[in-house]
Amino acid sequence: WNHLYSSLSERSRCLAAVAEPSQSFTMGTNCSRTEDDTPGVLLTLRSAKPIPVYLHIYDLGSSGQTSLVNTVLKSFDSGAFHCGVEVYGLEWSFSDILEVNGERSRTGVFSSWPKQSPGHNFVETVNMGCTNKTEVQVLHTVAQMEADWPISEYNILRKNC
């Protein structure tokens, strides 16, 4: 799973700064798209057709106690939750416990497979509509966000997922 949590800025260096919609290129070894240990993966730029975006909501942590508390608090529009945004088959989120290859990451932004954020129990999905951005544009946007979401600034009440 470590390849899913690598810094997107490392991956974004592999992206062309400006790419034509008909081009394709290989992303680096830290690409979240790889499912094995191959050195990179071919990423084809997609047209700007509407792509669905989903918000996946989880009970914070994996204990059954949080699920029980959230069931009660939901009627008060409250609870302790984790969330992630899925677009182009990856779920993006923010956390303070990210380690890559045994080293603590500088950014708290990470990706996982949809509905499988580690350490949390999936609860529900909310459809957020669609984006017209290409996959490369989405990855570039997330890479830019890494600077604004450093792991050192995570706060469970003020700056979290």
Image (cartoon, rainbow, N blue to C red):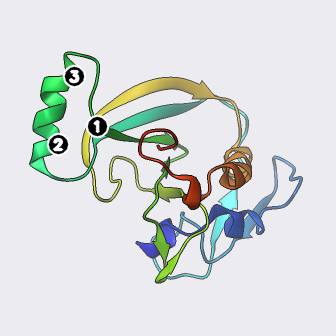
In-front residue for pair 135/92 = 92
The single residue placed furthest to the top in the displayed view is: 76
In the displayed structure, would residue 155 be above or below residue 131? below
Residue at the (78%, 62%) spot, across then down: 15
Left or right, 6 with respect to 138, comes to left
Disc 1 to disc 2: CB gap under 8 Å: yes
Q: In the image, what residue type sits under mark 3?
A: Lys
Q: Say which mark, if any, is on residue 32.
A: none
Marks 3/2: CA distance?
12 Å
- Helix, strand or loop status at disc 1: loop
Q: Which residue is mark 1?
A: 80
Q: Mark 1 or mark 2: which comes first in sequence?
A: 2
- Mark 2 surroundings within 10 Å by alpha-carbon count, few (fewer than 14), some (14 through 19), many (20 or more): some
In-front residue for pair 158/150 = 158
Left or right, 56 with respect to 92, comes to left
- Mark 1 surroundings within 10 Å by alpha-carbon count, few (fewer than 14), some (14 through 19), many (20 or more): some
Residue at the (61%, 82%) spot, across then down: 39
Q: In the image, what residue type sits under mark 2?
A: Thr
Q: Which residue is mark 3?
A: 74
Q: Mark 3 or mark 2: which comes first in sequence?
A: 2
Count of numbered circles on the image: 3
Left or right, 59 with respect to 110, comes to left
Residue 26 horizontal/vertical position (percent)? 71, 70
